[in-house]
């Protein structure tokens, strides 16, 4: 690890001095629309009573929303496209305390994937209106899943293999 200091870093922060790997492919399925146009306006954590936001899916993914309205809460994964990817140590409160990137929920990470639990308000064609996001407007959308605790597959019936 090499400690570098740039104008957008806080005291105690450090970056990884290594080339960034390009060994994965993520397909964006749409765009997130929020009222948050700058990092200063973006909340630190989304609030389920926050403003309405839009998950606008590309037309080819519209059919993938079939059945989504059966769920009140969704997990939304998104690509934090405006984030740095090289900090290994961070001082998020600028109070002199330094913490490792993986011990924080900061958007600054090697793979800047955001995760929010949102409340589904309604579906409008290929668009979901939700509350609870904490990302910038025009953030690329990676995936949508039913809340992990709400969807538990049924265990196979003990007599199923006898049929």
Image (cartoon, rainbow, N blue to C red):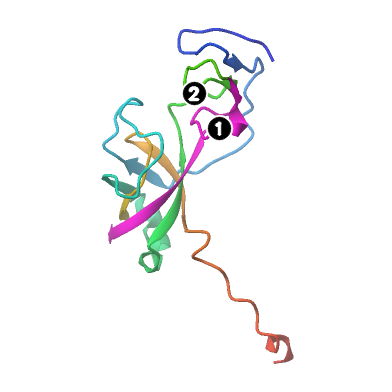
Indicate the position of residue 51 as horizontal and vertical percent values: 26, 44
Where is residue 155, by image quadrant?
bottom right
- What is the quadrant of residue 97 in the picture? top right
> Looking at the image, is 142 positioned above or below residue 122?
above
Which residue is tagged 1? 104
Residue at the spot 36% in from the left edge and 49% down from the top edge: 58
Q: Residue at left 52%, top 62%?
A: 149
Residue 69 lies, in percent from the top left, at: 35, 66
Q: Are marks 1 and 2 in contact (CB under 8 Å)?
A: yes
Q: Is residue 125 visible?
A: no
The residue positioned farthest toward the bottom in the image shown: 163
Q: Please tell me whether residue 99 belongs to the stretch shown in magenta.
A: yes
* The magenta stretch spans residue 101: yes
Residue sitting nearer the eye, 127 or 60: 127
The spot of residue 39 in percent (x, y) is 36, 26
Q: Residue at x 64, y 34 (%)?
A: 23
Q: Is residue 78 above or below residue 75?
A: above
Q: Residues within 10 Å of mark 1 (few under 14, many from 20)?
A: some
The circle drawn on residue 92 is: 2
Q: Secondary structure at mark 1?
A: loop
**Disc 2 on helix, strand or loop?**
loop
| Span of residues in magenta | 98-124
The image shows residue 63 at horizontal and vertical percentages of 39, 62
- Crowding at mark 2 (Cα within 10 Å: few <14, some 14-19, many 20+): some
Q: Quadrant of the C terminus?
A: bottom right
Q: Which of 89 and 97 lies nearest the eye of the viewer? A: 97
Whichever of callouts 1 and 2 sits on the residue coming sooner in the sequence is 2
């Amino acid at each position: 690890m090499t400690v570098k200091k740039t104008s957008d870093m806080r005291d105690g922060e450090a970056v990884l001095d290594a080339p960034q790997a390009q060994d994965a492919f993520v397909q964006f399925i749409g765009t997130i629309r929020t009222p948050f146009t700058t990092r200063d306006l973006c909340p630190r954590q989304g609030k389920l009573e926050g403003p309405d936001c839009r998950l606008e899916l590309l037309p080819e993914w519209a059919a993938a929303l079939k059945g989504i309205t059966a769920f009140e809460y969704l997990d939304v994964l998104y690509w934090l496209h405006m984030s740095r990817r090289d900090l290994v140590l961070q001082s998020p409160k600028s109070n002199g305390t330094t913490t490792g990137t993986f011990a924080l929920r900061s958007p600054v990470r090697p793979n800047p994937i955001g995760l929010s639990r949102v409340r589904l308000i309604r579906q409008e064609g290929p668009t979901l209106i939700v509350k609870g996001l904490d990302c910038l407007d025009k953030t690329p959308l990676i995936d949508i899943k039913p809340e992990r605790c709400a969807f538990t597959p049924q265990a196979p019936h003990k007599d199923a293999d006898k049929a």
